[in-house]
Each structure stands twice: as structure tokens, then as C-alpha cells.
Image (cartoon, rainbow, N blue to C red):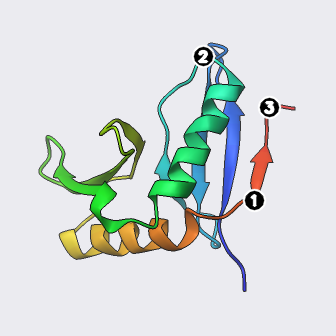
Amino acid sequence: MATGHYEIKKAKNGQYHFNLKASNGEIILSSEMYASKASAENGISSVQSNSPLESQFELKRNVKNEPYFVLKAKNHQIIGVSESYSSESAAKNGIASVMKNGPTTTIKDLTL
């Protein structure tokens, strides 16, 4: 059964970030920017351990009143943000996808 994976990328400003992609290639969670690749890898580790826990997700709305969600670590820091969704039920499906795909240990390092 196909599962999702993480992609670590280096931005033009030299910082690192990662995306969690579902098995269909869609980005389902994006990280903040990190100063080092090691910090981004630590962020992935935090997503892997927190994504199975529904209590770590928070539904929010953006300025256009579109639903999206964040994944928080145990220290309440945001470790990932979703895209905007057309409905709250679609955002909840996104949470379910992150809960399913987040624990994956497949990491594609695109910085090499």
C-alpha cells in the first residue's frame, strides 16, 4: 500500500523547509522555514510523533474565512500548516490524511 512521504527542500534564501505529501503527491502539510537542515529534520520527527494524535490538530480560518488546520507539538508550537480548504469537512479529511501519512519514515532529501 502506497503511503506518503516527506520532502526536504532548500529555499533560495538558504533556509530549509519540508512538505508532507500524500500517496497521490498532494502536499498535505507544510513546515515553517528552518535555519539548518538538521532543524528541518527535527521538525519532521516532531510531525511523525504528533500527527497520529487528533488532539494536536487545530482547525482555523484564514482572512477569507476558509478553513485550514495546524499541527502542534506537545509544547504548543505549530509544526505544520495545511492549505486552505473549501469546507470544514474537507479540512477534516485533510487532518485524517495527515494522521495516516504523518508517521511515514520515507524522507526525500531534495537539497542534495
Local crowd at mark 1 within 10 Å, few (<14), some, or many (≥20)? Answer: some
Residue assigned mark 2: 35
Residue 14 drawn at (x, y percent)? 67, 14
Q: Which residue ends up furthest to the front in the rendered image?
A: 74
Distance between mark 1 and mark 2 Cα atoms: 22 Å
Q: Is residue 14 left or right of residue 90?
A: right
Position of residue 90 measured from the top left corner of the image (x, y, whole percent) = 29, 73
The residue singled out by tag 3 in the image is 111
* Lower position in the chain sequence, tag 1 or tag 3: 1
Query: Helix, strand or loop at disc 2?
Result: loop
Depth-wise, is mark 2 or mark 3 nearer the camera?
Answer: 2
Q: Are marks 1 and 2 in contact (CB under 8 Å)?
A: no
Q: Can see residue 36?
A: yes
* Image quarter in which the C terminus is found: top right
Residue appearing at x 55%, y 62% in the figure: 102
Taking the spot 49% from the left edge, 45% from the top edge, the residue there is: 30
Q: Tell which of 38 and 10 is nearer to you.
A: 38
Instruction: Specify the amino acid type for callout 3.
Output: Thr
Disc 2 to disc 3: CB gap under 8 Å: no
Nearer mark to the viewer, of 1 and 3: 1
Against 78, residue 7 (above or below) is: below
Instruction: Tell which circle, 2 or 3, labels the residue nearer the N-terminal end.
Output: 2
Secondary structure beneath disc 1? loop
